[in-house]
Image (cartoon, rainbow, N blue to C red):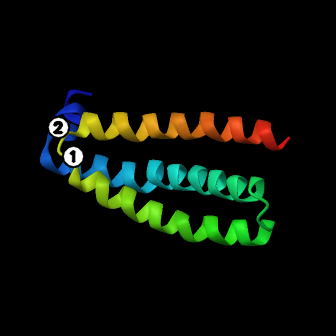
Amino acid sequence: MQAVIHYLKSYNGQVLQRLLAAIFIGYLLANVLSVIVAEIGVLLAMARASATELATIISFVIYTVIILWAFCIKSIRKMWQQLLGSCLISAVLLLAIKGLTS
């Protein structure tokens, strides 16, 4: 266990953490945000197909920005906090929007 903690604090471990966070948490966050965009589009009287297309295009931009951001921020702890906090806030927002459309 001590070796794993030591590895995660090393440079290679930090790069691995950033990579895993960017790939998995970034993907989750981009998908949740794209669903939010699609639901807002539908609420604004946009056709469902157009809202889905817009959300898909925006999700590629969001995912790219999250990947770049994960490698630009200096602190690993801050990166994890902000990514997971963003996921939590996005999930709550999605549930609120879903409640409006139900």
Q: Which label's residue is closer to the chain start, 1 or 2?
A: 2
Q: Is residue 38 left or right of residue 87?
A: right
Q: Residue at x 76, y 65 (%)?
A: 46
Q: Are discs 1 and 2 less than 8 Å apart at CB?
A: yes
Q: Split into 4 quadrants, where in the image is the C terminus?
A: top right
Q: Residue at x 64, y 50 (%)?
A: 36
Nearer to the camera, 80 or 102:
102
Q: Mark 2 packing: few (<14 Cα in 10 Å), some, or many (20+)?
A: some
Q: Is residue 11 left or right of residue 58?
A: left
Q: Mark 1 packing: few (<14 Cα in 10 Å), some, or many (20+)?
A: some
Q: Residue 15 placed where, x, y %?
A: 23, 52
Q: Is residue 85 above or below residue 22?
A: above
Q: Residue 47 placed where, x, y %?
A: 80, 68
Secondary structure state at the residue bearing disc 1: helix
Q: Is residue 25 left or right of residue 75?
A: right
Q: Split into 4 quadrants, where in the image is the N terminus?
A: top left
Q: CA distance from mark 1 to mark 2?
A: 6 Å
Question: Which of the numbered marks, if any, corresponds to residue 9?
Answer: 2
Nearer to the camera, 24 or 69:
69
Question: Which of the numbered marks, if any, corresponds to residue 14?
Answer: 1
Q: Residue at x 76, y 53 (%)?
A: 43
Q: Residue 101 placed where, x, y %?
A: 81, 44
